[in-house]
Image: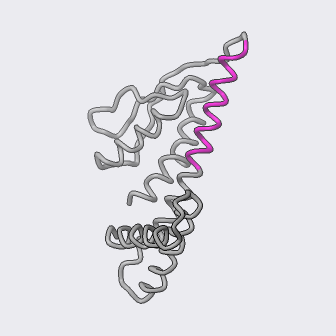
């Protein structure tokens, strides 16, 4: 899989060099063009994980940026208005993530989102304790985090 990614990056830089224009749009077009060339070349190959994982990664990036924007707007609104709407709490989030890398990535994604912060991890590594700034319901937070962020992240990593 890393081989396809490196070839895709190489084709992207080749496209940028041939066109002579280094812009985000041209780089993105070159990446998509390289992806399509590799997909056509590797149709009969055995390892097709790369071609299923790249769209999931792109979808995850858009999902996470949307969540970041929502959280930033919520915190900014609370800071600007004269009344505070905070309802802080600590939630024990049961984990489906098993490896060190999966747990680290999930905790980083949660901590980078404004209004949430990973406080601790249980000794058996099955529960992550998260401080939530705007906690309406523990069950809702657990449900949305597990079905949203954790599920999408584990689809990419596994």
- Give the prevailing secondary structure in the magenta stretch: helix
- Among the 4 quarters of the image, the one containing residue 144: top right
Q: Is residue 47 left or right of residue 72?
A: left
Q: Vertically, is 78 above or below 143?
A: above
Q: Nearer the viewer, residue 143 or 154?
A: 154
Q: Quadrant of the N terminus?
A: bottom left
* Identity of the residue drawn at 65% across and 17% down: 79
Q: Nearer the viewer, residue 109 or 31?
A: 31
For this orientation, the residue located farthest to the front is 20
* Identity of the residue drawn at 52% across and 21% down: 89
On the image, the x and y values in percent for residue 31 come to 50, 68
What's drawn in magenta, residue-wise?
63-81
For this orientation, the residue located farthest to the bottom is 44
On the image, the x and y values in percent for residue 155 come to 46, 59
Magenta stretch containing residue 77, yes or no? yes
Q: Is residue 105 left or right of residue 15?
A: left
């Amino acid at each position: 899989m890393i081989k396809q990614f490196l070839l895709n990056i190489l084709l992207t830089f080749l496209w940028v060099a041939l066109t002579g224009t280094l812009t985000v749009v041209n780089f993105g077009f070159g990446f998509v063009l390289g992806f399509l060339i590799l997909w056509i070349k590797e149709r009969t190959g055995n390892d097709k994980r790369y071609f299923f994982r790249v769209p999931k990664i792109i979808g995850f990036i858009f999902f996470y940026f949307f969540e970041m924007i929502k959280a930033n707007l919520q915190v900014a609104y609370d800071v600007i208005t004269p009344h505070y709407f905070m309802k802080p709490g600590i939630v024990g989030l049961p984990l489906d993530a098993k490896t060190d890398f999966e747990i680290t990535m999930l905790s980083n994604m949660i901590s980078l989102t404004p209004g949430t912060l990973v406080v601790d991890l249980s000794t058996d590594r099955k529960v992550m304790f998260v401080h939530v700034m705007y906690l309406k319901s523990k069950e809702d937070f657990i449900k949305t985090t597990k079905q949203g962020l954790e599920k999408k992240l584990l689809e990419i990593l596994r």
